[in-house]
């Protein structure tokens, strides 16, 4: 019998150009490769459109309009949940009896629906959402958005107990695994790191000519990290720096313009971004939010040269040995000066391959197939 799986995605996961979409898309790709028939349900909003690539990988793709009406802000449900409540989704899930994978808390409205009581259900988290939203609130400049994020964090924490209706919780990091095991001891939690676009290591030996920081620059976590690096590290050195990512805010654009050694690459295509990553000499990663598993970390470890990261970026992983650790500006500057003229060798590539082997997509695919 052919195995089938419903996946409910919070967004259209193609193009796979930011963290959550990368995990969902490459999970679909890897399961498809093993013959799993995917029935994908995704919410359509913003500028992401229906995808021919998804149609090729899935047995069926359903699209639902996300309702972003202001009235949904007034619900006792988190806005990110309420805006994805859709009766048509439930009708489509009830057409068969296949297992259901709920991608992040935002899609979990139906987890305790009585009509789905006897279905196998898996909950996949990418962050501990209330912690993530509180951290976003700390870094937010707009007063009204800060209040929204704080209220949303409160609602998400209250709603989180919904996940006790899942058969399994799939955790992206070991730190988050510990949280879910302690908070919901009666619901089995499984360590399943994020899926990514690399089935093999593809780092280039040799040397690059610039330092790269990249990320979705519309998110406060990322643009604040870029600002911190500019103010404390990049402005103190003369090496060539590239900052690349989606939709940077104007204040970041203006900050970059002040520095002759820093250039901005906005809204690159997936292939353009990958070329930037592969050709860089050093990847500088920094975050103040040690939540989830940072997909940009996996991307640079699989396809980049030297990586400098702070301990928060590596929280809940076993990847510290693959990186050069820096937590303070002077440590970043020291590591940059040591690594900028150094060759990235085949020996270092082989060592990294061994360190990151737990992130292998094939192992994760096998584990997920056993669960469904």
Image (cartoon, grey):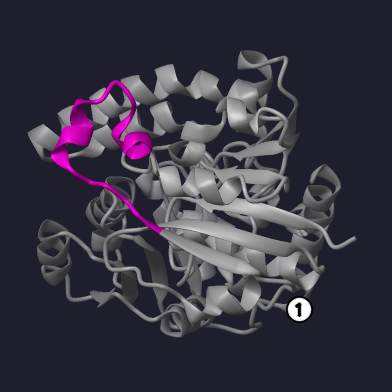
Q: In this view, does 346 lie above or below 118?
A: below
Q: Which of 166 and 60 is in front in this view?
A: 60
Residue lying furthest right: 1
Residue 352 magenta-highlighted:
no
Q: Nearer the viewer, residue 136 or 162?
A: 162
Left-right relation of 259 to 212:
left
Q: Is residue 153 above or below residue 65?
A: above
Q: Which of 102 and 22 is in front in this view?
A: 102
Local SS, label 1: helix
Residue 105 screen position, x and y as percent: 48, 36
Question: Picture quarter containing residue 240?
Answer: bottom left
Residue at the (22%, 63%) spot, across then down: 248
Residue 98 screen position, x and y as percent: 73, 48
Disc 1 packing (10 Å; few <14; some 14–19; many ≥20): few
Left-right relation of 218 to 35:
left
Residue 27 seen from this side: no
Residue 63 seen from this side: yes
Q: What stretch is highlighted in magenta?
A: 64-82
Residue 310 screen position, x and y as percent: 49, 45
Residue at the (24%, 65%) spot, across then down: 247
Residue at the (39%, 64%) spot, across then down: 213
Question: Picture quarter containing residue 265?
Answer: bottom left
Residue 250 screen position, x and y as percent: 11, 61
The residue that disc 1 covers is 346
For the N terminus, which image quadrant?
bottom right
């Amino acid at each position: 019998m052919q195995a089938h799986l419903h996946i409910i995605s919070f967004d259209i996961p193609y193009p796979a150009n930011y963290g959550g979409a990368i995990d969902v898309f490459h999970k679909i790709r890897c399961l498809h490769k093993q013959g799993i028939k995917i029935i994908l349900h995704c919410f359509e909003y913003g500028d992401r459109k229906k995808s021919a690539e998804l149609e090729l990988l899935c047995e069926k793709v359903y699209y639902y309009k996300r309702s972003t009406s202001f009235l949904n802000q007034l619900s006792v449900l988190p806005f990110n949940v309420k805006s994805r409540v859709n009766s048509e989704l439930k009708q489509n899930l009830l057409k068969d009896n296949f297992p259901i994978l709920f991608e992040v808390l935002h899609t979990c409205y139906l987890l305790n629906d009585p009509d789905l009581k006897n279905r196998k259900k898996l909950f996949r988290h990418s962050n501990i959402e209330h912690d993530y939203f509180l951290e976003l609130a700390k870094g937010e400049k707009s007063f009204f958005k800060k209040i929204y994020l704080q209220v949303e964090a409160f609602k998400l924490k209250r709603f989180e107990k919904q996940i006790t209706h899942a058969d399994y919780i799939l955790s992206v990091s070991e730190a988050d695994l510990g949280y879910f095991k302690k908070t919901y001891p009666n619901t089995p939690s499984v360590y399943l790191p994020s899926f990514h676009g690399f089935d093999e290591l593809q780092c280039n030996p040799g040397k690059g000519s610039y330092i790269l920081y990249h990320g979705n620059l519309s998110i406060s976590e990322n643009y604040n990290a870029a600002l911190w690096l500019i103010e404390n590290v990049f402005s103190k050195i003369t090496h060539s720096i590239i900052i690349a990512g989606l939709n940077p805010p104007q204040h970041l654009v203006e900050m970059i313009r002040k520095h002759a050694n820093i250039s901005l690459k906005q809204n690159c295509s997936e292939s353009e971004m990958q070329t930037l990553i592969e050709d860089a000499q050093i990847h500088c990663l920094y975050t103040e939010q040690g939540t989830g598993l940072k997909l940009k970390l996996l991307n640079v470890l699989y396809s980049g040269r030297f990586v400098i990261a702070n301990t928060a970026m590596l929280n809940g992983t076993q990847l510290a040995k693959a990186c050069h650790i820096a937590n303070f500006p002077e440590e970043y500057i020291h590591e940059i000066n040591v690594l900028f003229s150094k060759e990235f060798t085949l020996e270092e590539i082989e060592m990294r391959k061994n360190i990151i082997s737990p992130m292998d997509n094939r192992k994760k695919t096998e584990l997920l197939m056993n669960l469904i």
